[in-house]
Image (cartoon, coloured by chain):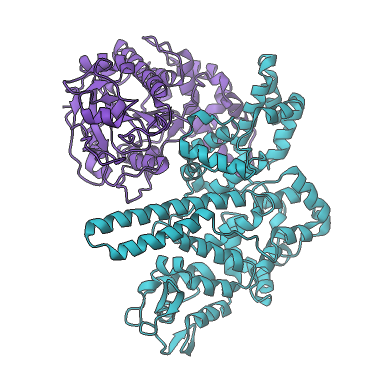
Amino acid sequence: MSAPLTPEQAWQPLPASAWDASAARHLLRRAGWAARPAEVDRAVSEGLPATLERLFPSTPPPFPRPVFMVKAEERLVEVRAKKRAAATPEERRVVDRDERELERLASIEFSLKWLQAAADPARGAYEKWLLCLADVYVVAFEKVRRAEYHYVHRDLLRTLGTGPAPVLTKAISRSPAMIDYLDLSRSSKRAPNENFARELFELFVLGEGHYTETDIKQAARAFAGYRHGRDGFRLDPRAADTGSKTVFGRTGPWTGDEVIDLAYAQPAAATFLPREMARFYLTQTPPPPEFFAPLGATWRTSGFELRTLCHAFFGSTVFYHPDHRANYIKSPVHYLLGLVQDLGLDLLPLPRTTLQPLRQMGQNLLEPPNVRGWVGGRLWINSSTLAARRQLARTLCTPLDEDTLNADERLELTAARDAGRARFTVDDDRIRDLASLGARGVADRLCDFFLPVGVPPAYRAAVVDYLQTGAPGEFEERVRRATIALLQSPEYQLC
Amino acid sequence: MLLPSTRREFLRHSTRGIGLLAFSRFAPRFLVQSSLAAPAPEKDRRILVLVQLAGGNDGLNTVVPFDDPAYHALRPTLALKQNAVLTVSDHLGLHPACAPLHALLKEGRLGIVQNVGYPNPNRSHFRSTEIWETASDADASLPSGWIGRYLDNACAGAPASSDPDAIHISAEVPQSFGGALPHATFGLALGAARASRTETPLLERLAGREDPVADSNHAFLRATLMDTLVAEKNIQRILDAAKPAAPYPAGNFAQALRNVSALVAAGLPTRVYFVSLGGFDTHANQANAHANLLRQLSEGLAAFQADLTARRLDDQVLTMTFSEFGRRPVENESRGTDHGTAAPLFVMGHRIAGPLHGAPPDLRVEKNADIRFGTDFRSVYATVLDRWLETPADAILGARHERLGFLA
């Protein structure tokens, strides 16, 4: 083990001399999903600052509403009109059902289209950053059963995810999904609901121990009357509380936005999100907040600009420290999208082969388990989730048996092919190309390109030995199986 | 005896036996037992085999209401005539491809639960499968599957073991298996019966290496993976050595059932098996495709039952089929049928009371409308949970559902 870094050393930019292929692979796997050889070469030749500029650009990559969601919204307008006109409970029930069904289909489409976008190596890092932010500003479909709200929520994270954090947090406090998820819609001057104010301090800005129960009670009053409707956000004047509040020792007729500014003025704000980032990207057991003070100071000076934070975090010395190499357990989303990228595939656009495996691996995309989001780390791994990971590797490395697909699935595949996405699984040609490298070449390719861990010679020898066993006509099949085994290995679960 | 009779034999047979055990935290139950004596399968095991007919089976052409004029009006080209079907009652007959099932029916080993479905049916494959597998209401969603909740209940407090609680032979892990607690579930690849034909031998060597790793997450992943591989190795050994006691037809579906029988015979503590037969989404030119599917189903199930009977294990196994939905009563313009609602399902075992359960569907439907279900699928589950698996069905299903008489 190398000597531990002091906080000052830790957050110094990585010296240019330390930027090599191994560092580039580490960055690409941790900030994104995979380290494809061409991307590694490009990152090394461009240098770290230019690479970060590319991974975390000033203009976020767009993600327009999927066509199906637009259509579903149009249908929903009709359905809701029908619902208002429904004369009998029976009629209402039928309309309710249509509504739920449309929302469900739209949420599936949203998840699939997002996964498709996130699988693009050019935007993987930013999409993963959104997943990190969504793990802070948590909302769940189970409680907020409106796909459109989830789209809007994610879109706020997307468009504001490069700018000042207070701007993002204020926008999130007006997000319909958040207003419903944390019960702001039921909060009024007479009965302020503390749910949002508590999570604002505890989970979005400061962390536990940096506020009092009084701060929460007083802050909750500032968010009373936050509502959303067809015309967007509004503050209901009858439910709002314009009276004087005392938050963090400061007294005034604070609005919700002003309370958020007061929270960011607290010292703990500078280190809270950086530490959450460390938990998401670096280690399950991040060091105490003090360790993040130098990074926090840089961030605060920038006006809490999130892009500055990303560049400083992923450009730091500590991010590349040997203690943080190849020892983080991939989340199910990371495992799926890492496979898709490592294998050079297009995401199979079927719920059964994407969303269902994610759920079996423990990550139901729009359903984080609670307000804290996913715990991750070793909790991702047990015999059932490992079985699901192994099955996914097998599925993606085996030619698709289209005879077993149902008619809906065939339509989805046709649509994806028409859109130029056709490589859903590893086909025989790819295996033949790989096999042409010979046993040793195949073993090196698999170990060097897929595994984040440097493996001992005996490991490679085991792969070579496996490839060389068996009848000559069997070699390509063995190459396929060896590929699957490497992708199922303990080493490939790490990044 | 299919099991290794001693611990040493097990070790000798595994490629890297020592490594395998050194990295596994729990010796599988069978291994602990077999080091003392060859385990005899428990006498009173109750095993459930679920057979998924993926795609939506056409119930009306499976259990045929041959004398109903409405049926013939709805199905101008697809209807089966009285002289073609295998008579079950004065009004119903099985599809001619179901002769082996018909024989089981006459022997009291097969039952038909008619017109099974649920209120407010959903016609999406994905969603309706989810409803069946989680046993939820159509307008609710449950995070866990009905088998997973059964395992939550049955395995709570049981000693940790790497033996699988449930095994599936299908490309995906069934949603039914998901529980609130993690369970040792295990998937066998379709058509890959022999261990040597999968990637597993290499994975065992990679994960079972004895060189220490410094990182604890790495070590944790190795140990957890070795646990699952120990279970898998055991299973593959059983399958490689298995000799069925009755002949099975060719094809993946029958071979999957052959594997289930081998595992049951080997005395695994596994309580639930899941096997899938796909291709039932017969939107066009249905007649031949459906006949072939029903033939595979019938021949496979009959071979399985004959094998279990010859091994005297038939009193330990109950088999039931399910499909996400039935199909539209009226045939479409392509001589096929579109997504529908309720359909019959089969239950098979050594003693099934009565051939028919529940009422048949009323086919007097409006143009292009669906039949209305008669028996809630959760009644079938409740009956199986209560009278076969002997667990508190209502708690697992979250509501009280009527029990049916097929296990009386």
Q: Residue at 79% across / 50% down in the picture?
A: A42
Viewer can see residue B305: no
Q: Residue at 36% across / 84% down in the picture?
A: A238
- Nearer the observer, A85 or B36: A85
- Nearer the observer, A376 or A426: A426
| Residue A350 screen position, x and y as percent | 51, 42
* Chain B drawn colour: purple
| Location of residue B64 (image quadrant) | top left
In this rendering, is residue A247 above or below B104? below
Viewer can see residue A176: yes
- Nearer the observer, A344 or B344: B344
In this rendering, is residue B200 above or below A194? above
* Chain A drawn colour: cyan
| Residue A343 screen position, x and y as percent | 66, 38
**Relative to residue B273, is residue A37 drawn left or right?**
right
| Residue B166 screen position, x and y as percent | 39, 31
- How many marks on residues? 0
In this rendering, is residue A16 above or below B147? below
In this rendering, is residue A419 above or below A458? below
**Relative to residue A71, is residue B294 drawn left or right?**
left
- Nearer the observer, B278 or A89: A89
| Residue A90 screen position, x and y as percent | 23, 56
Q: Quadrant of the N terminus of chain B?
A: top left
Q: Quadrant of the C terminus of chain B?
A: top left
